Amino acid sequence: MGLSAVDITLFSISLIASAAIGIYHGVRGIKSTPLEYLLGGRNMKSFPLAMSMMVGTVSAVTIMGNAGEMYAYGTQFWVMDLGIAMGMVLVAKVLIPIMYPLQMVSLYQYIEKRFKSKTLRQATVVLQLLGGYFFTGFILFPPSIALKFFTGLPIMTNIFIMGATCTVYSAFGGVKAVVYADVFQAVVMVIGVLAIVIQGSVAMGGIDKVWDTAYHGDRIEFFNLSLNPYQRHSFWLCATLGLFFALSTYGVNQSQTQRFFSTGSLNEAQWVLYYAAAGMVFLKAIINLAGLVMYAYYKDCDPITDPKNYIKDPSIVVVKYVLEVLTKVPGMSGIFVAAIYAAVLSSVSTQLNSMTALLWEDFLKELKIFSDYSEVKKGAIQKIIVFLSGVLGLVFGLAVSQMGSFFKTLFTINGALTGPLIGLFLVAVYFPWINAAGAAFGFAISIILNIWIVVGQLFTQLPAKHLPMSREGCLVPPPHNNTNSIQLNFTTPAFEDMNTAVTTETALMNDEGPDRSLYALSYCLNSVWGTLICIIVAVIVTAVTGTNAPEDIDKKLVAGKSWALFERTVSLQGREPLIKSFLRRSSSAQRSNSCSKRDTENPSALELSPDGVDQHKVKNAEDDG
């Protein structure tokens, strides 16, 4: 059941090559400055950066999760990639022209510039750091369980190998090592997934046969145009999920924006997104096809519904398929294992590089202890930060291995933070009249409410029902299961662990049913709620506390059309806070009521003549005369 010598050699070469790339760039850049270490001196080319951006967001969980989604639920989720492509183009057209000219290292410097609030900037950074470290642990742990069945190595050992490898080349070589290692790993990932698609298609009689089998098994669905927000997936829900995923990942997340900050011009920065969008669509397409290949293979003998197996999560079917099918061809399974390792390494190294940038730029750079350091010495400090971040990531990975499904909850809650962050940036870019208080309250309240919704979903929703499965073919050994096939033991407790740890990128949801509560809404809309709540609360708080005036902000930080509207609309500029207005009017009303009450209690003080003249005033005037 283990890998052959050829397989082990192939994935070992992959690991060694990744480390060698980092060491090479580390030797070349041994005296690199912070700008060179974190952003490659802002002169890197668009295409390698795009490849790095693409694989930095496609983890091993993506490979296993998306393939499992196609296997068990069909192709509706594929539409998410359309939303991702649209969102990446939107980021390139709208956000990059504002962000890139600011020449930032940390994306969240923009928040401080726009709202003149260092506290708000650091709050966003802290959330990103916490999410980044937990995400590092998450992407290290689940694949390590699957790799245990490929390599025979213990879970802890797999976590250590993957974490240590990417820590070494990330710490030595900086962003250049990460980017060029990602390019190599992108090639490995494509080849590894294609191994499933090609080998499986050949065994099933061609890709057209695979597609036809999936079609008759009700797996092909793209245009469910229902507007019902309570269903698990539809065209609109998946497109929305993809759009907000792109905005959160490529627009307001340091790990990816750091890629286009590393280019030499605005045009090249935009092309990073365009290239990455095309590469993402292609890579996700072959991953999804791999899921359909697995369905065609197991359509008459589904392992998920086998009562004797621990396999319950569709993601894990990938492991069974590779061990049963790819091991028949020497080297094939080794290539796939290398792809899994590559996916983990690319994602972890991207996180380490971005977290170092945040820690240095947003917290450590301004400390007095570093003020007298040379640029080269500051670069050395950053290498130490990457190394320590890698160690901390390893600790999180090992800790997650003891948490089971508990960490799954934490990871889902972390996903609830993306909506509020999108909302905060949209407020900053498109609502110039909104002040810092409005933005801060909107951000904080949207986080609280979004977490509340997600936690409610986790505790109330049941796993979604799979599409029809069959085990009729298991009664008679199918042609592809001959006596020479490897007999697999999928009834071990390790697979029970995998079912609690390996989570697809699609959360578990109820099918459409009678439940119409807030918690029953599709998970695809979670980021939407966070974004809307942030914007609405920011508008309300600003209306109460008073809007900005044009001189309060730099118009370069705001979208052009929004600034033009702001300048033309007097009612949006520096209005008196409603609280102050209310208190002033209340005070005037109280004074008026007080005078009226006094006059009523002393009627002799006010004597009017028949023609309406105040006789008291006349008398006083005569006395003065």
Image (cartoon, grey):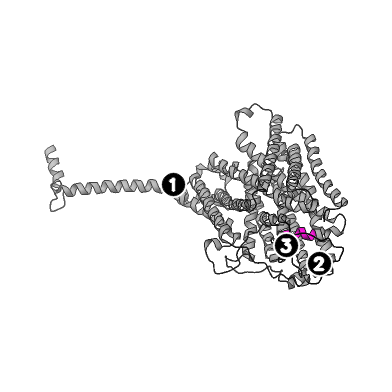
Relative vertical location of residue 309 with respect to residue 429 in this rendering, above or below: below
What amino acid is labelled 1 in the image? Thr
Q: Main secondary structure of the magenta part?
A: helix
Residue at 67 percent of width and 51 percent of height? 92
Q: Closer to the camera: disc 3 or disc 1?
A: 3
Q: Residues within 10 Å of mark 1 (few under 14, many from 20)?
A: some
- From mark 1 to mark 2, how far is it between C-alphas? 62 Å
| Along the line of sight, the residue nearer the viewer: 270 or 136 | 136
Q: Position of residue 480 (x, y in %)?
A: 84, 67
Residue indicated by mark 1 = 545
The answer to which quarter of the image holds residue 504 is bottom right
Side (left or right) of 453 relative to 490: left
Instruction: Read off the magenta span.
Output: 316-322
Residue indicated by mark 3 = 309
Residue indicated by mark 2 = 207
Which of marks 3 and 2 precedes in the sequence?
A: 2
Q: Position of residue 188 (x, y in %)?
A: 80, 51
Numbered circles on residues, count? 3
| Along the line of sight, the residue nearer the viewer: 79 or 140 | 140
